Image (tube, coloured by chain):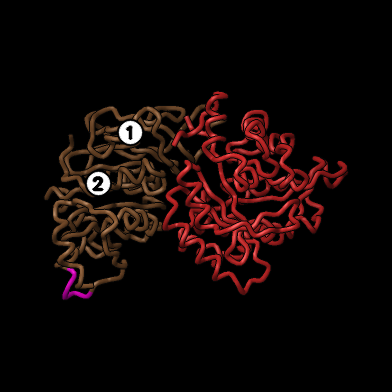
Chain colours: A red, B brown
């Protein structure tokens, strides 16, 4: 039986580990490579490195971080942020990542999903989406809208439609990040996660809002997620990866003990 | 690079002294020195099938010397061979034949050189694959089949962490217990013809062979290089393995 995955997300800015609350007030909280290695040793299942560097001039720094992480962390990991072409994807894969996460660039150019999927396989193409809860309308029937540019720009795209479109275009996995719950630590957006997980046949990862181990349990059971993305909950020493896993195992979920 | 040959020489037999090892890069050696240095080394077979550097990085981390190579003479003279791969069976086998790597693999298998197959490499050492209807190397009898699962909730590819249960003793899985999990990403699975070639099994809507082996050949459907400590342990055991099956 396949285990539910615990995935740590490290936001990286100019080569440093950063953490934002509702995509604002970014703080520098340390070295991403050391942190990745620490989580690996605690039994983490998977890692996402997200490049939030404002300037594209500093992409080289990110590739260096990716390759240093690949030298120390022997679990699958993906890289997102600033990937706009098959070449950008190839660069991070060659630096040692397994998968790439695309977000804003996929909204602006949906064929990028197919191009990456065809070039490297669907398992490489992760579609990450930032979602804002809105008033349900004719254009946004689900009541969840896709936003881009780290949450600053609304797109008029319905999140449920976009998830299914992403799958059709060849995405191998979806990360559903709720802007409303991100960094607030009051729990994942369960309704949203479940709605999408029930509508697609590719793995769905819940993201945004974990503050307690129970929140992961809810996302992996009620939310029907295949994995749960965590950030603040482990970055500030409230819980270790092992604490989270112990809790979920004790609640009876299939989780890898490492 | 010559400076560490003497150090390499004391490593015959595959004993690894971690922490003291001098890393060498994976560059291509000139004709004049490859036959000598490659003899002590693990050759990671390069046939343009996916990212081989992750296997190399894992071995580097363990202080185990290796080289990525697609040159048949280097594969023949290597102490051990790792045959990884991500991609499609059809084009992979075509490349292996065209470059003479297929013959080299047959030869090292006959000669008793320890070989570790990984993922697509594991499927290709069988006689045939349903993927692209490919005739494969045939080092082990049987074929690679595509998952046909009746449960609509089970997604294909089988991707993520799953249990691996040894059905017979094998030195490369000595550390595996009922809690050990490995990382998988695949849509096809190995199906050896002979029960005795199955080393471990995994459940995913059905039971399939997640590790197979015959004599000096051991091959996993999972990715040891991406399976945390349990996977690193398989690679470490391979570096110490002389090719005996139990």
Which is nearer the N-term, disc 2 or disc 1? 1
In magenta, the rendered stretch is: B30-34
Count neighbours of disc 2 (C-alpha within 10 A) and say few if under 14, some if 14 to 19, many if 20 or more.
Answer: many
Q: Position of residue B63 (x, y in %)?
A: 29, 56
Q: Secondary structure at mark 2?
A: helix
Q: How many marks?
A: 2
Confirm whether the magenta stretch covers residue B32.
yes
Quarter of the picture holding the C terminus of chain A: top left
User: Does residue B142 lie above or below A149 as drawn?
Assistant: above
Q: Position of residue A35 (x, y in %)?
A: 53, 53
Q: Residue at x 84, y 47 (%)?
A: A139
Q: To which chain does the residue with label 1 belong?
A: B
Confirm whether the magenta stretch covers residue B207.
no
Q: Which residue is mark 1?
A: B176
Q: To which chain does the residue with label 2 belong?
A: B
Q: CA distance from mark 2 to mark 1?
A: 14 Å
Q: Which residue is mark 2?
A: B238
User: Does residue A62 lie above or below B160 as drawn?
Assistant: below
The label on residue A180 is none
Q: Secondary structure at mark 1?
A: loop
Q: Residue at x 54, y 67 (%)?
A: A87
A101 or A8: nearer the viewer: A8
Answer left or right for B12 relative to B83.
Answer: left
Q: Main secondary structure of the magenta part?
A: helix
Q: Residue at x 71, y 61 (%)?
A: A108
A205 or B90: nearer the viewer: A205
């Amino acid at each position: 039986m396949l285990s539910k995955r615990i995935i740590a997300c490290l936001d990286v800015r100019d080569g440093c580990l950063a953490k934002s609350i509702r995509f604002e007030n970014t703080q520098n909280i340390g070295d991403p490579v050391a942190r990745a290695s620490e989580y690996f040793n605690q039994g983490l299942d998977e890692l996402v490195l997200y490049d939030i560097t404002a300037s594209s001039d500093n992409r080289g720094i990110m590739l260096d971080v990716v390759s240093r992480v690949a030298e120390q962390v022997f679990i699958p990991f993906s890289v997102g942020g600033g990937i706009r072409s098959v070449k950008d994807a190839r660069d991070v894969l060659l630096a040692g990542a397994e998968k790439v996460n695309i977000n804003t660039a996929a909204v602006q150019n949906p064929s990028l999903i197919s191009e990456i999927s065809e070039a490297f396989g669907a398992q490489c193409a992760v579609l990450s989406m930032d979602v804002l809860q809105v008033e349900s309308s004719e254009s946004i029937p689900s009541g969840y809208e896709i936003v881009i540019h780290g949450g600053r720009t609304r797109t008029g795209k319905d999140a449920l439609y976009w998830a299914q479109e992403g799958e059709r275009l060849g995405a191998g996995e979806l990360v559903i990040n709720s802007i409303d719950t991100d960094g607030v630590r009051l729990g994942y957006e369960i309704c949203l996660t479940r709605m999408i997980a029930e509508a697609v046949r590719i793995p769905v990862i819940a993201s945004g809002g974990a503050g307690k181990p129970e929140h992961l349990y809810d996302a992996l059971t009620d939310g029907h997620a295949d994995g749960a993305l965590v950030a603040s909950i482990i970055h500030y020493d409230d819980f270790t990866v092992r604490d989270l896993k112990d809790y979920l195992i004790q609640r009876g979920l299939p989780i890898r003990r490492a | 690079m010559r400076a560490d040959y003497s150090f390499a020489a004391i490593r015959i037999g595959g004993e690894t002294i971690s922490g003291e090892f001098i890393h060498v890069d994976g560059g291509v050696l000139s004709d004049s020195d490859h036959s000598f240095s490659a003899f002590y080394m693990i050759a990671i077979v390069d046939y343009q099938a996916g990212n081989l550097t992750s296997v190399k990085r894992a071995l580097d981390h363990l202080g185990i010397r290796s080289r990525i190579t697609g040159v048949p003479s280097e594969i023949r003279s290597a102490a051990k061979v790792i045959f990884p791969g991500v991609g499609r069976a059809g084009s992979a086998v075509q490349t292996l034949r065209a470059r003479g790597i297929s013959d080299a693999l047959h030869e090292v298998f006959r000669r008793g050189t320890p070989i570790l197959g990984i993922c697509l490499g594991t499927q290709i050492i069988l006689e045939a694959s349903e993927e692209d209807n490919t005739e494969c190397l045939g080092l082990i009898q049987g074929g690679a089949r595509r998952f046909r699962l009746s449960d609509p909730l089970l997604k294909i590819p089988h991707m993520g962490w799953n249990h691996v249960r040894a059905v017979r003793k094998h030195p490369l899985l000595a550390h595996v217990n009922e809690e050990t999990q490995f990382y998988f990403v695949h849509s096809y699975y190995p199906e050896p013809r002979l029960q005795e070639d199955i080393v471990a099994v995994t459940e995913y809507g059905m039971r399939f062979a997640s590790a197979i082996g015959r004599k000096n050949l051991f091959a996993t459907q999972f990715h040891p290089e991406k399976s945390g400590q349990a996977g690193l342990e398989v690679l470490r055991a391979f570096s110490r393995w002389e090719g005996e099956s139990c």
